[in-house]
Amino acid sequence: MQKFIGLVGTNSDNSTNRQLLMFIQSHFSDKVDIELVEIKGIPVFNKPENKELPQQVKEIAAKIDEAAGVIISTPEYDHAVPASLINALNWLSYGIFPFVDKPVMITGASYGVLGSSRAQMHLRQILDSPELKARIMPSSEFLLSHSLEAFDESGQLKDKEQIEKLESLFEDFLTFVELTNHLNQAHEINKREAENFSWEEI
Ligand SMILES: Cc1cc2nc3c(=O)[nH]c(=O)nc-3n(C[C@H](O)[C@H](O)[C@H](O)COP(=O)(O)O)c2cc1C
C-alpha cells in the first residue's frame, strides 16, 4: 500500500485541521496508508550556521522523503498560514529538500465561513519557493468551513456533500501522484538547483 504523510499544519492541541486529517486517514485507509505528522515542539527557526537541524525536523524530512505524497491541512491565522507551519517549512528547506517534486494536496479547516481559503493560497506560494518546490495539486481546494460543527462524536464529517467532494479530490490526488511520478525528467536538476540555491548569493 502506498504511504502518505498527513502534515498537521498547527501546533495547537485542539485542532479541527488535525480532526480533518484523522478523518482522511481513516476514510481512505482501504486505499492508502496515511501517517499523521505533528509540527508541535519544533523550535523556532534561527538559521544555525552549522545547519544542524533539530532531531524532530530530520525525522519529519525522512518521512516526507519516503512518502508518495503529503497532505497538508492548514488553519488560517490573519489571512495566512500559522507561524508554526511556516516555521516547520523553513526548517524543512534549510539544507534539506524533502519537498522538491513531492506531490502535495492542500486542505484546510476554519471556524468561519471562508474555510482557510487565503491560507491555502499562501501555502501554495510558500511551497513554490526555490528550496521547497513541491508539486502542488493544481486547481483544487478542500475548504472545511464552520469546522467546530463539522464532525460528529466519532470524528466523521457530517456533511455528505463534503465527503463526496473529498472523495473525488482524493481520487484526483492519487492520479496526480501517478502523473507526477512521470514528470521526473527534471527531478535531479530540480534537486541540484535547490541544493545550490542560496539567498545570500542573489
Ligand atoms: C490569531 C488568529 C487569527 C485568525 N485569523 C483567521 C483568519 O484570518 N481567517 C479565518 O477564516 N479564521 C481565522 N482564525 C480562526 C481560525 O480559523 C480558527 O481559530 C482555527 O485555527 C481553525 O483551525 P484549527 O481548529 O485547526 O485550530 C484566526 C484564529 C486566530 C487564533
Image (spheres, rainbow, N blue to C red):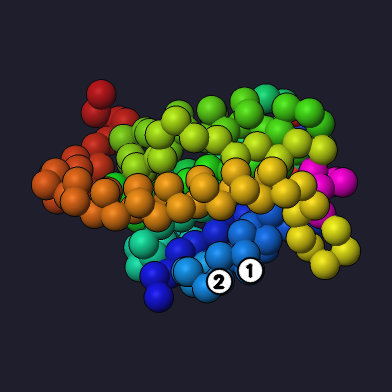
Numbered disc 1: secondary structure? helix
Name the one closer to the observer, 50 or 101.
101
Point out the quarter of the image occupied by ligand 1.
top right
Q: Quadrant of the C terminus?
A: top left
Mark 2 = which residue? Answer: 29
Judged left or right of residue 15, residue 22 is left
Name the one closer to the observer, 91 or 109.
109
Q: On screen, 122 above or below 192? A: above
Instruction: Using the rendered image of the protein, determine whether residue 108 is visible from the camera's viewpoint.
Output: yes
Residue at 65% x, 37% y: name it: 143
Q: On screen, 14 above or below 32? A: above
> Badge 1, how many Cα within 10 Å: few under 14, some, many 20+?
some
Measure the alpha-carbon separation of dots 2 and 1: 5 Å
Name the one closer to the observer, 137 or 123.
137
Numbered disc 2: secondary structure? loop
Question: Mark 2 touching mark 1, by CB under 8 A?
Answer: yes
Write the start and end of the magenta stretch as one range: 147-151
Indicate whether residue 167 is drawn in magenta.
no
Residue at 82% x, 38% y: name it: 146
Mark 1 = which residue? Answer: 26
Q: Quadrant of the N terminus?
A: bottom left
Where residue 80 appears, x then y in whole percent?
Answer: 63, 29
Q: What type is the residue that disc 2 sits on? A: Ser
Residue at 36% x, 43% y: name it: 134
